[in-house]
Image (tube, grey):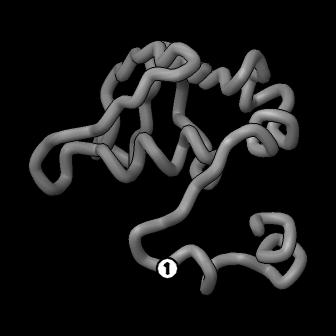
Amino acid sequence: MIAIHDLIKRYGSFTAVDGVSLDVAPGEIHGFLGPNGAGKTTTIRMIAGLLKPTSGRIVVNGHDLAREPEAAKASLGFIPDRPFIYDKLTAGEFLRFH
């Protein structure tokens, strides 16, 4: 289960994600569609715990990502479409990621 409530991500004066709310029940599959720059990847990265939201709440399998990040991340799988993340991780973070 994934629950997103009023998720916002800002970079200075630019708002990349603006008030996204979504509930995904167990067994459901959802996709993000939209043009480049719509905030799809940013939203997924926040759900995966790779980016911190400016505001809003993310709950993964009953674990609030802000309060219980390790438990939330442990119940979520994430495979990036491009391995840009690897250059940003320390060796320890890389091992924990996998």
- Picture residue at 85% right of the left edge, 30% below the top: 68
Please determine whether, in this image, residue 98 is positioned above or below residue 59: below
The quadrant in which the C terminus is found is bottom right
The quadrant in which the N terminus is found is top right
Q: Position of residue 10 (x, y in %)?
A: 40, 41
Find the residue positioned furthest to the front. Answer: 27
Q: Position of residue 91 (x, y in %)?
A: 84, 84
The residue beneath circle 1 is: 84
Q: Quadrant of residue 73?
A: top right
Which amino acid does the dot numbered 1 rest on? Phe
Q: Position of residue 87 (x, y in %)?
A: 61, 86
- 26 and 22: which one is in front? 26
- Label 1: element kind: helix
- 25 and 46: which one is in front? 25
Q: Quadrant of residue 32?
A: top left
- Picture residue at 62% right of the left edge, 81% below the top: 86
- Left or right of 44 on screen, residue 15: left
Q: Position of residue 60 (x, y in %)?
A: 67, 26
- Picture residue at 86% right of the left edge, 35% below the top: 71
Circle 1: is it few (<14), some (14-19), or many (20+) Cα within 10 Å?
few
